[in-house]
Image (cartoon, rainbow, N blue to C red):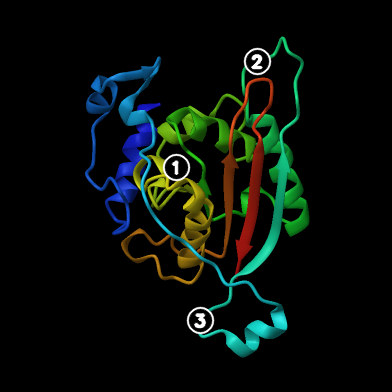
């Protein structure tokens, strides 16, 4: 899992609003204090302060108001997790993310292969492994291999995952996190992301979650697809 943090720090080093901008080695990650085996402190996101806002308007109104490239919401789905039987007490968000993203892809008329970048809810390193699989960027069980290959890094040949640095390095301001992910996509789709710009970005996806509870596969999941 440590390579997820290595990637996120490399991306965050290019992001002036990221909380952790110093690059880090696998050894430093693995040698940091253990939080919940196998996750060390550097594999858990920091909590910080931030604010984010978005302006939503109709397609007709945007022609009147827009001073920059408008970004369209191509698909957006929010749903809660399913309740499991009492004997299944482990919270597994993968099913909820897979269901929600499938509906968002259908609404947008697009698929995983059409995404140029993704901002996902990587509160812990293992979350990125789970979510890249659930979003369809690789087969189940291949998330770690995809990250280790470097293909999801800036300059890679797959979807760029968390060019902002993600929750692990940009930070996790809780209530503002989802809109920060949205803002990151908007900056890339407008070509305004500076040194971390994903080249020729036209379509991106956001996955974010809120809450977790034993016997549920995630309380709330939101997946949105934006494009220009």
Neighbours of disc 3 within 10 Å: few (<14), some (14-19), many (20+): few
Q: Residue tagged by mark 1?
A: 151
Tell us which disc is closer to us: 3 or 1: 3
Query: Disc 2, disc 3: CB below 8 Å?
Result: no
| 29 left or right of 137 in image | left
| 191 left or right of 91 in image | left
Q: Pick whichever of labels 2 and 3 is earlier in the sequence.
A: 3
Near-viewer residue (151 or 70): 70
Residue 200 visible, this orientation = no
Q: Residue tagged by mark 3?
A: 68
Neighbours of disc 2 within 10 Å: few (<14), some (14-19), many (20+): some
Near-viewer residue (204 or 38): 38
Q: Position of residue 134 (x, y in %)?
A: 63, 35
Residue 86: mark in rendering: none
Tell us which disc is closer to us: 2 or 3: 2
Neighbours of disc 1 within 10 Å: few (<14), some (14-19), many (20+): some
Which element carries disc 2, helix, strand or loop? loop
Residue 89: mark in rendering: 2
Q: Disc 1 versus disc 2: distance between alpha carbons?
A: 34 Å
| 210 left or right of 14 in image | right
Which element carries disc 3, helix, strand or loop? loop
Which element carries disc 1, helix, strand or loop? loop
Please name the residue shown 59% across and 30% down the image. 212
Please name the residue shown 71% across and 33% down the image. 81
Q: Disc 2 versus disc 3: distance between alpha carbons?
A: 48 Å
Please name the residue shown 53% across and 59% down the image. 182
Q: Disc 3 versus disc 1: distance between alpha carbons?
A: 31 Å
């Amino acid at each position: 899992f440590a390579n997820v943090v290595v990637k996120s720090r490399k991306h965050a080093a290019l992001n002036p609003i990221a909380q952790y901008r110093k690059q880090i080695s696998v050894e430093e990650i693995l040698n940091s204090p253990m939080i919940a085996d196998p996750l060390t402190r550097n594999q858990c996101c920091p909590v910080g302060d931030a604010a984010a806002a978005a302006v939503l308007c109709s397609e007709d109104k945007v022609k009147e108001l827009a001073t920059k490239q408008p970004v369209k919401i191509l698909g957006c789905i929010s749903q809660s997790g399913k309740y499991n039987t009492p004997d299944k007490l482990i919270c597994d968000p993968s099913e909820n993310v897979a269901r929600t993203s499938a509906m968002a892809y259908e609404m947008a008329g697009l698929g995983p292969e059409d995404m140029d970048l993704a901002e996902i809810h990587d509160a812990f390193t293992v979350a990125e492994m789970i979510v890249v699989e659930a979003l369809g960027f690789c087969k189940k069980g291949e998330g770690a291999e995809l990250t280790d290959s470097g293909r999801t890094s800036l300059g890679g040949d797959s979807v760029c995952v968390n060019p902002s640095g993600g929750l692990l390095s940009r930070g996790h301001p809780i209530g503002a996190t989802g809109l920060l992910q949205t803002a990151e996509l908007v900056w890339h789709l407008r070509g305004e992301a500076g040194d971390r710009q994903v080249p020729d970005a036209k379509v991106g996806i956001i996955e974010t979650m809120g809450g977790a509870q034993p016997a549920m596969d995630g309380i709330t999941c939101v997946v949105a697809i934006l494009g220009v």
